Amino acid sequence: MFTKLLIANRGEIAVRIIRACKEMGIRTVAVYSKADAESIHVALADEAICIGEAAAKDSYLNQERIISAAIASKAQAIHPGYGFLAENASFAKLCKKYGIAFVGPSGELIDRMGDKDAARRLMKASGVPIIPGSGILENVDEAKKAAKEIGYPVMLKASAGGGGKGIRLVKTEDELEQAFKTASSEAQQAFGDGRMYMEKYIYPAKHIEVQLLCDEQGHVVCLGERECSIQRNNQKLIEESPSPGVTKGKRAELFKAATKAAKAVGYVNAGTVEFLMDRDKNFYFMEMNTRLQVEHPVSELVTGKDIVKWQIRIAAGVELDCTQADIKVRGAAIECRINAGGVGKVNFLHIPSGPWVRFDTFLYQGYEVPPFYDSMLGKMIVFSSTREEAIRKMQSALCELVIGGLPNNIEDQIDIIRDPVFHSGDYYTDFIKNREG
């Protein structure tokens, strides 16, 4: 096992990884930008190294500075968290070049699954159901031809996409040219890759994902599925496990498909296979996320497996201590993302507690939230023996959570949790759009 690990991230996920390392007896190295000098992950780590100015490109995205910090501190491994360099193949390869373990899959594997079009083709060849669609579209004319064959409405998607960027819904041919140009431009700016492909628009649909752990010995286990259909502009707001829309039989099919996907690419470490499921419970492969997901805690709570610790163990060559038969999904867990509506100073902070209630955050009273990074302030997470009780527990926790001095979406999350459609479990990715008209 590693004796020292560097966390190439910030915010709540950096805190989460540091705490896991403390429990494992691993010393930690935090890296931080000048804007994050007063951030709590800097105080919690055993060592901290400033890697640059506030802009992410000068700090958290600066691969050479992070590698230099790892070498200088004699860290044996780097955990990238999520976002920033978590799915950056060149960074994973750079770690390998300097003899530093990257806590995640290899750079070559990230490359393969990061190309959404190539991943679709591989899944189809492996017998995993995929959404009807096209290959890479070189221009608008090819897009128009593909849309006619697939049938409107269609989704334009960036081949290198993620985080909701480079995606456009196109309902008619009149909309296609402008949508293609803007989505491609957005993808080029976000990922340095403007290539687009097209899929049939599945509507209404549930966004269901399966959490995997895969070791170097070729073992694969599924840690249940997550329901991620509460979204605004393709950004998830609430996640729960298990999904209220997945039957026992369908769960077995999803696990089989996700396992098949992982084995087809020889996947190693924690990963997530994402599916769309229509009203008739037909499901289709969307993509594979080659990193830790924001919503991983709900899977941990219903299975009892610490995903962050297992990421580190697998990166150190440790074999999984269980088989699929050992994984039992019990109870229900819900996570609500608490996002800032602007910047400001936290002048009052009250965090709810109680059995199976937790708030993963980097906030503290007096902390001034910098304007340079993601808007997520924390994740309210609850667990209970039934979904009904978990919903009530989440409502109570959200009503008790207070983040003073900083605009946020707590009230919006309370409204969603109270919505009868959410309670029914029969909701889809258009939930927010339908509520907001």
Image: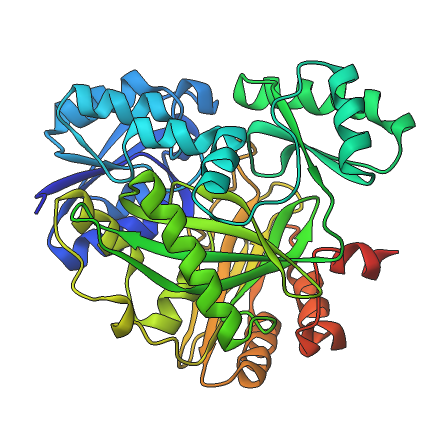
Q: Position of residue 24 (x, y in %)?
A: 14, 56
Residue at position x 66%, y 36% in the image: 133
Q: Is residue 195 above or below residue 200?
A: above
Q: Is residue 27 above or below residue 301?
A: above
Query: In this image, 133 relative to 53: left or right?
Result: right
* Residue 351 shows in the view: no
- How many numbered dots are placed on residues in this image? 0
Seen at 32% across and 20% down, the residue is 63
Left or right of 121 in this view: 47: left
Q: Position of residue 109 (x, y in %)?
A: 33, 32
What is the x, y in percent for residue 214? Answer: 27, 51
Please determine whether, in this image, residue 413 is positioned above or below residue 40.
below
Taking the image as shown, residue 209 lies to the left or right of residue 219, namely right
Instruction: Please tell me which residue lies in front, 287 or 122.
Output: 122
**Closer to us: 229 or 48:** 229
Q: Left or right? Give the position of 264 relative to 139.
A: left
